[in-house]
Amino acid sequence: MSVIPTTGTAAFEPLAEIAESTNDSRPSQLLTKEDCLEIFNQLYLARYFDIRLIKEKKRGRLRGTLYSSHNQEAILVGALFGLKATDWISPIHRDMPAFFLKDSKFQWDDPTRSGMSIEEVCAQVWGKVDSPGRARDNWSHIGSKSKRIIHSTSMLAGTIPVAAGVVYADRMNGGDAVVLTFNGEGSTAQGIFHEAVNFAAVHKLPVVTIVENNQWAYGTPVHMGCPTPDVADRAHGYGIPGLVADGQDVFDVYDKVMAAVEHARSGKGPSIVECKTFRAYGHGDHDDDRAMKYRPSEEIEKGRTRDPIAICRESLIERGFLSGAEAEQYIAERKSASEATNDDFPPVVVEYLNRGIEFALNSPLPNAEEGAMWVFKENA
């Protein structure tokens, strides 16, 4: 863990306090047993979503490219769990579970919550008419103004200036919303990343830039794209805080992101939270075989050993929230998509995703006449 030091300002104190605090004083220690078990179930849900889609494609029931979040689930769950419903998020291609995890705490099926339903997200994956994008893309290029989700694009880091503009407008209208932007470590080498974070820093905008450092930007290792020991060190140049979280520990992610969120919400400006993790598969499933060649086998094996589900399970056992046979149920960790079965996941998780997938499979394709919809301005 590292923290970007301050220079002649007290604005960094909340983050510094979190960085230096003991385990007993961290925000995650204030979570109830019910909160922690909900977080555990959300990790299962994110993992099962990933595994189930891989299985569906192998069965020939799904087409298109899949971008796996396998082994990175703690970042999404930990980052989103403490947000307000009025906060914004800006996911990227590896964050598909974020669309249905937003504002899902204890209310997965509440239609009024500020997040997408599992039916909407699955319809998007299958490219059906009931998807938010009405079959114009089969993956993450969706969003919702009403749900406060900024549309994902393929231009990584390109949504940061959009996010900055969204919360700038919110503050001008008297709101207190914070926006989380998710980015790969490779995107931090792009010019737009620096321009956008600089703009947010100058105007003290409540933008928390989460860097999912999974060690590889497609086939480029992190040391070829970032010259500093931690990607969060880039925060030095903007005079803003930078935190490094263990991206495999959902509670450490929660602690660091909540510190950054409260810092932003109080008017002290943006920050960078780097979550160190490891990409279990290739950049996309089209890259799986190639990734086995450009990444050393020992690196892959080591990267997969610290499974987020296993680490969360151990934390819950230590806190007395899981014990006995209950603690040994549903061992999904360290299993690939081909190894895992439905019995490795809580029934509520399996049933939830089954419902979304069946909805998508039974949803029709849009009519051909819709091809020009949203392309040309209709006559007034």
Image: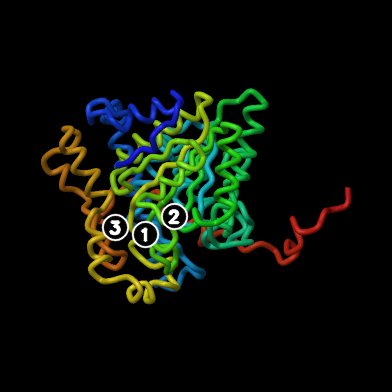
Residue 95 at x, y = what percent?
46, 52
Position of the N terminus by quadrant: top left
Residue visible at 23% across and 68% down?
Answer: 298
The label nearer to you, 3 versus 2, is 2
Q: Amino acid at mark 3?
A: Asn
Residue at the outermost right position: 380
Q: CA distance from mark 2 to mark 1?
A: 8 Å
Q: Which residue is mark 3?
A: 342
Please name the residue that numbered disc 1 is placed on: 215
- Secondary structure of the residue carrying numbered label 3: helix
31 shown above or below 72 = above
Spatial CA distance of label 3 from label 2 is 33 Å
Residue 185: mark in rendering: 2
Q: Residues within 10 Å of mark 3 (few under 14, many from 20)?
A: some
Q: Position of residue 318 (x, y in %)?
A: 15, 36
Residue 131, image x, y percentages: 59, 54
Question: Which amino acid, by three-letter code, is at mark 2?
Answer: Glu
**What distance separates the C-alpha of mark 1 from that of mark 3?**
30 Å
